[in-house]
């Protein structure tokens, strides 16, 4: 099937924090890519807003540099770059005062042609309430207005509720787009396609046939100069509460009645509510928290977490959890989650591990029997591999081999895999909330996470150490080995 570019309505995208890191690395490059593909209607504009006293001309130069750094050379044709740059405007605005707001209003209202107005808050969450209130005060909110916010959406249930409350004072829930960029990844969309566009998997998608599920999000980077900032969140708040739990929900949810946003989000919410609470009685056997020590990552010497932070801390840069879902489909099927910084390789994947065959008819000499597994790789090199047993081709009798049915997207479809932000930024304009978290989902996730912190505090559970460049502390291996299972480690060439 040929590639389709679905046009969107004309819009103005206002990027609060338009001079920040997120805007430079993701938002501007992603909007450029959509423009390059011809998806942005002619009159659409992008308006940067932050306190820096820049002219629109200076902001265009800033954006040009951002594209140079973050878009590959062969995807930056002059004609496309110039067309994109011409859409850019800039207004100095302070979220915390009235400075610049009248100018922003005048610019946004310059065209009253019914276009969509999206406000992306690429600023700290402490400014979400201020900006929402100012948008209302300066009459910038109507039916065509959308608000985009991103993690951290709170640091516990109470602060998440407060954040939702201050935003909810000015915006209706259907106008609020809470980004979790993992949901925009091609493989995650593919998980939905595999589960609900094939009759093949659904009958097997339960505890009768699935032994367990693993979700790993491993990074090789450390915290470096952002140590002070990171130390306030750590792996649990930064990764588990949002990205890992969202992935778990998509694997575990019941088939929704339709592809409508709320049909899917209702099912995800049910999963979050069915998660078995982790308590001070169970935390020792179901959770591991750890910090990286010194070591070697990708051939380079690396410092330890506390070296980089320069002070004592119990914040974990690695977390492994055994989650259980108390419902008919998943009773007795553990979901092992782990995420960490300074790990052996950068890799995010979901592994659906099927149960072994009940009985082998093959002689010992035929080789080891491996259970089937479906491996969805989110990064790098997004792919879906269904591991199966086959007969090793050629003469030599019956020899069994474990091989992947491979759908490595970039190779098989010769398609540039769009960045998750590209899809999500335009879903906002389309008003499609399917891949965005609803208020009650965010709160339900915190409701499960908060007691884990309480349990760690109450039981004074140790913060383990792992060498930089490893797969985490031995306690993480024990967490899963205790159940006679092993993590699906290793690079693309490692035996699996
Ligand atoms: P950043 O580089 O520090 O940028 C912050 C932006 O906010 C700057 O443009 C800053 O510009 C603007 N700003 C600060 N105070 C302001 C005020 N009073 N009024 C108007 N603008 C103000 O931060 P970032 O990394 O881009 O992250 C922004 C938010 O997104 C954070 O909450 C972060 O946690 C979240 N996030 C970031 C990433 C990422 O990859 N960077 C990923 C996920 C989530 P001025 O100083 O000129 O005002």
Image (cartoon, rainbow, N blue to C red):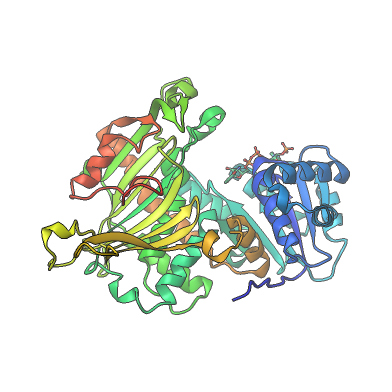
Q: Residue at x 37, y 79 (%)?
A: 199
133 or 440: which is nearer to us?
440
Q: Is residue 252 above or below residue 317?
A: below
Q: Quadrant of the N terminus?
A: bottom right
Q: Is residue 66 visible?
A: yes
The part of the image, by quadrant, that contains residue 407 is bottom left
Rendered position, 94 above or below 148: above
Residue 316 placement (x, y as % from top left) = 39, 35
Q: Provide residue 321's location: percent of width, then percent of height.
A: 31, 47
Ligand 1 position by quadrant? top right
Q: Where is residue 435 in the image (x, y as percent from the top left)?
A: 53, 64
Taking the image as shown, residue 442 lies to the left or right of residue 6, namely: left
Residue at image position (84%, 65%) is 43
Q: Place residue 41 in its image quadrant.
A: bottom right
Q: Quick check: 3 above or below 370? A: below
Residue at 66% x, 45% y is 25
Would residue 256 be seen by someone viewing this image from the given angle? no
In the rendered image of this protein, does residue 352 appear above or below residue 162?
Answer: below
Percent x, y of residue 87: 83, 56
Name the foreground residue: 388 vs 256. Answer: 388
Left/right placement of residue 299 relative to residue 30 reads left
425 with respect to 54 (left or right): left
Frontmost residue, 108 versus 88? 88
- Badge count: 0
């Amino acid at each position: 099937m040929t590639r389709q570019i679905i046009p969107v309505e004309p819009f103005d995208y206002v990027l609060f924090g338009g001079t920040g890191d997120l805007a430079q690395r993701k938002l501007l490059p992603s909007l450029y890519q959509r423009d390059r593909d011809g998806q942005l209607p002619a009159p659409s504009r992008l308006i940067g807003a932050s306190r820096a006293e820049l002219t629109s001309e200076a902001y265009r130069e800033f954006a040009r540099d951002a594209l140079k750094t973050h878009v590959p050379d062969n995807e930056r044709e002059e004609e496309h770059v110039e067309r994109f740059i011409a859409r850019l405007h800039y207004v100095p605005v302070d979220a915390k005062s009235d400075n610049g707001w009248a100018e922003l209003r005048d610019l946004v209202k310059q065209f009253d042609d019914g276009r969509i107005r999206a406000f992306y808050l690429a600023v700290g969450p402490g400014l979400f309430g201020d900006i929402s209130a100012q948008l209302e005060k300066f009459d910038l909110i109507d039916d065509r207005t959308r608000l985009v916010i991103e993690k951290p959406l709170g640091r516990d249930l109470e602060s998440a509720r407060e954040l939702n409350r201050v935003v909810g004072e000015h915006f209706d829930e259907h106008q609020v787009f809470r980004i979790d960029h993992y949901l925009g990844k091609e493989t995650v969309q593919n998980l939905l396609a595999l589960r609900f566009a094939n009759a093949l998997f659904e009958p097997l998608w339960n505890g009768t046939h699935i032994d367990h599920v693993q979700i790993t999000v491993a990074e090789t980077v450390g915290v470096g100069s952002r140590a002070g900032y990171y130390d306030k969140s750590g792996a649990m708040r930064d990764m588990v509460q949002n990205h890992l739990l969202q992935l778990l929900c998509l694997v575990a949810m019941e088939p929704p009645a339709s592809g409508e946003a709320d049909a899917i989000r209702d099912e995800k919410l049910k999963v979050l509510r069915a998660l078995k609470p982790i308590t001070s009685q169970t935390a020792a056997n179901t959770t591991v928290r750890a910090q990286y020590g010194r070591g070697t990552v990708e051939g380079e010497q690396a410092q330890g977490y506390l070296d980089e932070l320069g002070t004592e801390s119990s914040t974990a840069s690695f977390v492994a959890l055994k989650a259980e879902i108390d419902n008919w489909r998943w009773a007795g099927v553990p979901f092992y989650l782990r995420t960490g910084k300074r790990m052996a390789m950068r890799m995010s994947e979901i592994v659906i591990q099927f149960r072994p065959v009940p009985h082998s008819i093959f002689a010992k000499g035929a080789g080891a029997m491996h259970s089937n597994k479906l491996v969805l790789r989110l990064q790098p090199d997004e792919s879906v591999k269904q591991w199966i047993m086959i007969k090793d081709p050629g003469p030599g009798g019956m020899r069994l081999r474990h091989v992947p049915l491979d759908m490595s997207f970039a190779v098989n479809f010769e398609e540039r895999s769009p960045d998750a932000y590209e899809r999500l930024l335009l879903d906002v304009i389309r008003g499609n909330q399917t891949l965005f978290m609803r208020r009650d989902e965010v709160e339900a996730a915190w409701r499960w996470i908060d007691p884990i912190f309480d349990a760690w505090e109450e039981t004074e559970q140790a913060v383990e150490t792992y060498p930089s460049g490893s797969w985490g502390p031995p306690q993480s291996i024990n967490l899963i080995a205790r159940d006679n299972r092993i993590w699906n480690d290793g690079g693309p060439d490692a035996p699996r």
